[in-house]
Image: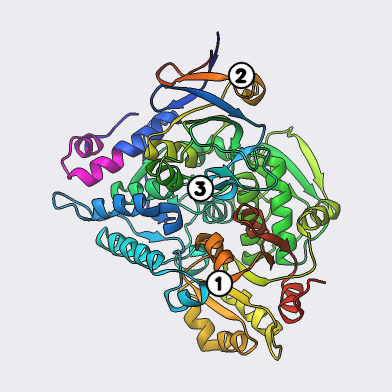
Amino acid sequence: MTELVARHAIGAPVTGQALVANDGFSARYDLDRVAGTFSRPAHKLAGQSYVGKILVLDTAKGGVASAWMLHEMASRGVAPLALVFNSVNPILAQGAAFGELTMLAGFDGDITALVPQGARVSLDPARRLLILI
Amino acid sequence: MNLSGEERDILAGALGPVPKLALEHQIKVGDFFGAEDFVPVTQAHIMADTESLGEAGVRWLEGLAAGKVGRRRVRIPTITDPRGTDFAKAAFLGHTAAMLTLEERTIAAFVKLGVMMTDTCINYQTVQPATLNEHVAFGDTGVVIYSNSVCGARSNFEGGPSALAAGLTGRTPRYGFHLERQRRATLALRVDFAPRSLNEWGALGGVIGRIAGNYWSVPLIEGIEASPGSDALKHFGAAMASFGSIAMFHMPGVTPEARRRADVAPDRLPEQRVGRAEIDALEKSYRKDDRVDVVVFSAPQLSLLELAELAELCAGRRFSIPLLAVTSPQVKPDADRMGYTRTLEAAGGTVLSGMCFYQSYAREIAEAKGWKRLATNSAKLVNILGGYGYVPMLASMEQCVAAAQTGRLA
């Protein structure tokens, strides 16, 4: 079991499967929020379902819509389980706060390289920990 | 966070449940970023198109607006980003009755909350630009980067719920670009060519946004010989924010906090050159076809000067495919009065007001109208629309107008 410490954390503890890519994240730019998949053709996760996954990505990109969209996706049960970033922008933090989503950001090292694809992961925001099970 | 007496009172419910909820949300965000306290803000700008809100977001707004106890109205001037439709052209766009009902409910809720429905993403050109050192809470990344960089104002990206919270409490957590230390340049880009057109300024912004890479980067841009003007800086900043999530740049001699490099940059910065080759490569990467289904000028909304230029290019032409020009409710009456709308529509174009193409159910428009290959002079728009199923292509205003006539992009 490996524990990785984040500098920023919000939300409730969760455990789930990681979906990992060294790419950005924007709910508007990257997602088909009806199908629950990554839809931007150039995205490294294009075509893959994000629903119920712990997304481990490099950084938040794009616009302010993600703050509403995380809340909207959660209301329909097509949201990711949690978000983990190397670097986060205010929109994702605001969206996580508003949508009551778990999010960790800022690690020593590239989190997209430290978490294996498909790994089972626990997030403990109170202790700012990502735990590889 | 350190709270003032007034903030403790709000948190205790002294002003009612709506300001309390707003402040609780702001404290969560402030705690996440380690904000020490709040900073008063003079204006808020809310991005809240209904495609983003969905039924859940609209119900949440209606819940706030229905509050009977305490204060529910905003306490500082609070304005809105583009809406999800232009009601006058909704049928043409294929917007459904359900979409329009959601819009109407949202507008009704915002009006009850005291929000001014300005419906614009170019408020710095049309409503009231923020001024040097003015702390504001702006949504729309293009508005934030322009206000921070060109106006010298101080704002983070404020998503809709947070911007509304700032309107309701009159303050925002003091972190990020409200702090002097966050506004220093973190990398330098030397531009060794002079962009000539808005699409080139947008492409340059996109290239720099990709290089800078994340919200906390502040590029210092050197090599720009003359002030580019408001519309060029608008496209430049909007694209940089879109491609890179960048909220601020400095351009010595042009932007107010960087009269000279030393004002904003340490002695040593990582440096990189950007030339025409990088701009051409970005444009070429989107050029997947030469056939075009629709031409769109939007993102950001067009200024009166852009509409004047566009009208001149459209005069006397007859389009074979739709051409849409999207502007703000403040600019549209002037465009009507000056005859620009009439000129565009005589050529077969459509002038839309108070919306922005990508914030107006772009995926559903594509399905309703059968549009896929889209030409635009907005680098921001090409960056966004790929995820909505379009094949967006970037070209100059002149090339886009010609494409509207021939159906092909030269």
Report the Cα–Cα distance between label 3 and label 2. 31 Å
**The one of B388 and A64 positioned closer to us in this rendering:** B388
Q: Which residue is mark 2?
A: A108
Where does the C terminus of chain B fall, quadrant-wise?
Answer: bottom right
| Three-letter code, disc 3 | Arg
Q: Which percent across, then down, holds residue B212?
A: 68, 41
Is residue B71 shown to the viewer in this render?
A: yes
B258 shown above or below B266? below
Q: Which residues are magenta?
A: B6-23
Q: Type of residue at label 2? A: Asp
Chain name for mark 3: A
Res B172 → quadrant: top left
Badge 3 local density, few (<14 within 10 Å), some, or many (20+)? many
Q: Which secondary structure is most common in the magenta stretch? A: helix
Q: Nearer the N terminus, badge 3 or badge 2?
A: 3
Is there one chain holding both mark 2 and mark 1?
no
User: Can you name the residue that lies furthest to the right here?
Assistant: B277
Chain letter of mark 2 equals A
Which residue is found at the position 68% from the left and 48% from the top?
Answer: A41
Q: Which residue is mark 3?
A: A33
At label 1, counting other C-alpha atoms closer than 10 Å, the crowd grade (few under 14, some 14-19, many 20 or more) is: many
Q: Is residue B380 magenta?
A: no
Q: Position of residue A62 (x, y in %)?
A: 58, 47
Colouring method of the image: rainbow
Query: Within the magenta stretch, is there residue B20?
Result: yes
x, y percentage for residue B148? Answer: 54, 50
Residue receiving disc 1: B326
Q: Residue furthest left?
A: B69
